[in-house]
Image: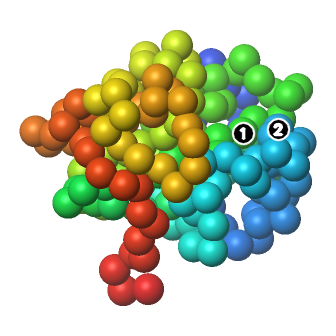
Amino acid sequence: MIHEIDTMLAPSLSFVADHSSHASDVLALHELAFGPGRFTRAAFKVREGVEHDRDLSFSAVEGGRLVGSVIQTRVTVGGHKGALLGPLAVLPDHEGRGIGRKLVYLAIEAAEAAGLDFVLLVGDAPYYRPLGFDPVGFGTVLFPAPVDPHRVLACCFGNLSARELGGTVKASIKAGR
């Protein structure tokens, strides 16, 4: 599935649904962006041993080269079904071009279309708040490893608000898989 490209982005840049052929390039991008410390992060602990949902994940490709990626894993928090966004990564020489923002918008759109209640992430509020994410209640969303509660943000759909989310983040498997 190819999505419309923002006019501020290069015409040779395309956004495509994640595919298994991207796997090694995505792993290399994560290594470059986050280093070996990525395996100790709370969000990684949620995703550990669970395949991300390719229907909710996207890649940015320019000239046949992967330049950005966002993956999402289906999760539950309390009685609500959602997606854990991340990692989001863009090659350093492509940062500042809106690629990350476009990938996040695609991820949000896909999660909402899939009938999920929210997209959750651990990230920098100044970057994610303008993209539709709000802080959850302080200490109400729990991860399997320590996380700064100020960095837990959610974009909710329907009548659900980020402040209403509460419970332990648990990976779930997509229905039908």
Q: Earlier in the sequence, mark 2 or mark 1?
A: 2
User: Which residue is farthest bottom?
Assistant: 176
Left or right side of 162 for 171:
right
Measuring 56% from the left and 22% from the top, which residue is drawn there?
124
The amino acid beneath tag 2 is Ala
Q: Position of residue 22 (x, y in %)?
A: 76, 63
- Give the structural element (helix, strand or loop) at label 2: helix
| 91 left or right of 5 in image | right
Q: Nearer the viewer, residue 12 or 107?
A: 107
Residue nearest the observer in this picture, 58 or 177:
177
Which residue, given by chain and number where applicable, does mark 2 sit on? 33
Residue 93 in the image: state x and y as whole percent: 88, 26
Q: Determine whether label 2 and label 1 are within 8 Å by CB.
A: yes
**Dot 2, crowdedness within 10 Å: few (<14), some or many (≥20)?**
some
Above or below, 35 relative to 144:
above
Residue 166: give x, y in percent of width and height. Answer: 26, 45
**Quarter occupied by residue 113:** bottom left
- Report which residue position mark 1 lands on: 89
Name the colour scheme.
rainbow
Q: Is residue 118 above or below residue 104?
A: below
Q: Residues within 10 Å of mark 1 (few under 14, many from 20)?
A: many
For the question of whether residue 143 can be seen, the reply is yes
Residue in the picture at 34% in, 27% down: 138
Q: Which of 115 and 6 is in front in this view?
A: 115
Which amino acid type is marked by label 1?
Ala
